[in-house]
Every structure is written in structure tokens, then in C-alpha cells.
Amino acid sequence: MELHIASIVVTTSSHHLARLETELNQLANVEVHASNGQDRLVITVECESERLLADIFARIESMPGVIAASVAFHGIENMESV
């Protein structure tokens, strides 16, 4: 079994920031870790497959108010060896 871990920077406008932070925290497998208080959020996604990670990323990109979503890190852990 694999565990995919990705760190994503989400860019928005200041008037969408609080709403997006709330909506992102409500998504399964997603956690907001940081906000610059103006236009960027740093989130982590942890899930079982690359396909699910791609689906979550596409969902984030299509959320109203998202200007851009950029993957800063993507790692894969083999859970059988942990």
C-alpha cells in the first residue's frame, strides 16, 4: 500500500481567503497548514493513490476563487515497509 503526500500552495484573492480555508479544511484528506493572511494557503493532501491525489487537485483547482494551485512537494511512502 502506498501513501501519497503532497504539499500544495493555493493562490486566491483576499476576499476569498477565509471561505477557501474553511472549504479546504472540510475536504477529506486535506489539511490547511498555513495562510499568509492575504492571498495564499499552504495545504497538505494525504491519500492512498496517485489517481485520488489528481482528483483532489483538480477539485481544488476548480473551486470558486482559486486563481492557481501549485504542487510544491509530492512524496510516496510504501506503507508495507513502515
Image: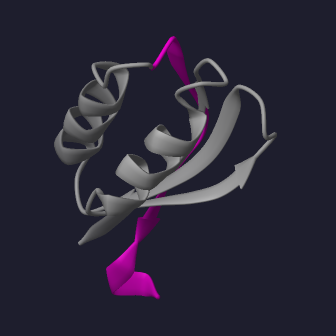
Q: Can residue 80 be seen in this snapshot?
A: yes
Please indicate whether residue 34 sits to the left or right of residue 50 in the image: right
Q: Can residue 5 be seen in this snapshot?
A: no
The relative height of residue 41 versus residue 12 in the rendered view (above or below) is: below
Looking at the image, which is closer to me, 43 or 24?
Answer: 24
Please indicate whether residue 77 sits to the left or right of residue 63 in the image: right
Answer whether residue 80 is magenta in the image.
Answer: yes
Residue beneath the point at 52% across and 14% down: 68
Q: Which residues are magenta?
A: 66-82
Question: Which residue reaches farthest bottom?
Answer: 82
Residue beneath the point at 43% across and 19% down: 65
Answer whether residue 56 is magenta in the image.
Answer: no
Q: Position of residue 53 (x, y in %)?
A: 29, 43
Residue beneath the point at 56% across and 49% down: 43
Please indicate whether residue 68 sits to the left or right of residue 49 in the image: right
Q: Position of residue 82 (x, y in %)?
A: 47, 88
Please indicate whether residue 1 sits to the left or right of residue 12 in the image: left
Looking at the image, which is closer to me, 76 or 29?
Answer: 29
The relative height of residue 18 versus residue 46 in the rendered view (above or below) is: above
Q: Specify the principal SS of the magenta part.
A: strand
The relative height of residue 5 versus residue 2 in the rendered view (above or below) is: above
Q: Quadrant of residue 25?
A: bottom left
